[in-house]
Image: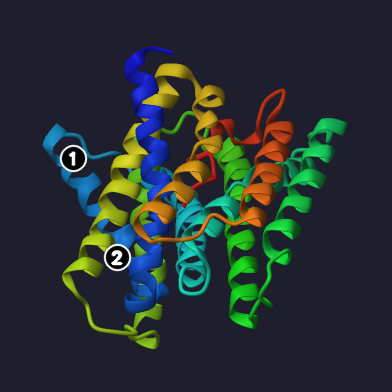
Amino acid sequence: MSPADLARLVALAALWGGSFAFIRVAAPVVGPLWLAESRVALAFVVLIMLALSRGRIPALRERWRDFLVIGVVNSALPFALFCFAGQYIAASTAAILNATSPFFGALAAALWLKDPLPLSKLAGMALGLAGVVLLVGWRPEPITAYALAAVFACLAAAMCYGIASVYAKVRMAGVPSFSTALYSQLAAAIVLAPALPLAPMNGQMTSIVAANVFALAVGSTAIAYLLYFRLIANIGPARALSVTFLIPLFGVLWGYLFLREPLSINMLLGGSLILGGTWLAMRGGTVASGSTRPRIAS
């Protein structure tokens, strides 16, 4: 890996890890649906402006159904779920739970593509499940109903990413990655828009909240997509997926530095088990190698 690609990989992990901190700040004020809509809509604007500056608008008509599915399963649903979770649990916890997506990808591939589940993948899933139980269950204070719902929302979002990775592998082969990034964000914005009148904002928009919304949409979505797809082109999807192991580290780091979130023993031990299980589950290839994102990150 060249120094430039290594820098891209670290920058990508920092941006995707930072998304959880941005959500933690903005979601309690903006609300989950408005924040998810703002994220995908602004990301689409940035990407379409880039396409216009290049003088090349990707084709939409032939694959619009696939873009719609990817937009819903890989963006609209998981983004809204993580934004809901960001109201009730720490950014670092959400970032760690996000790393379970390869487990769901392996299960989806086994059910859909009849891919085998070797012992290493099953062991990785078991280890990851133990990590989730340790992360969530071993804490001095009792977990609230909202916090528990937020944990399940994170796991549901990770499941969406796993399913999307398999769908992309089956249906999106040969589709330019920039087209997928562009039109999946458009599809997500269209799907989320009708629900906005039913979900008014929770508080007053401030400059800090607005800055976090902007950073989430532009940095952690539009720019992150461009970095990820550049890495896929340069070093291949399998090596690009090594970002999976860096995202929780940055998610915990940003939560600790900027949100003053504590580094608890259950977080460190549970996160270690989840990352170890992810490594085992990804050995010998990954179902996400053809995905629109490694899903992993929010």
User: Would you name the residue on which mark 2 appears?
Assistant: 38
Instruction: Locate residue 283 relative to residue 94 in the image: left or right.
Output: right
Residue 278, x across and y down, in percent: 68, 38
Quadrant of the snapshot with the N terminus:
top left
Q: Which residue is drawn at 35% across and 27% down?
A: 8
Looking at this view, is 94 or 264 the one in front?
A: 264
Up/down of 6 relative to 251, above or below: above
What residue do we see at 57% from left, 48% from top? 164
Give the class, few, some or many, for how many residues have Cα within 10 Å of label 1's Cα (few <14, many ≥20). some
Closest to the camera, between mark 1 and mark 2, is: 2
| Residue indicated by mark 1 | 50
Identity of the residue drawn at 33% across and 69% down: 26
**Camera-nearest residue between 82 and 264:** 264
SS at circle 1 = helix
Instruction: Tell me the quarter of the picture where residue 140 sits.
Output: bottom right
**Above or below: residue 287 compared with residue 88:** above
Label 2 secondary element: helix
Task: Please report whichever mark, 1 or 2, sits nearer to the chain's N-terminal start.
Answer: 2
Q: Is residue 250 above or below residue 134?
A: above
Percent coordinates x, y for residue 2 in the rendering: 38, 12
Q: Residue 259 in the image: x percent, y percent?
A: 38, 61
The amino acid marked with disc number 2 is Ser
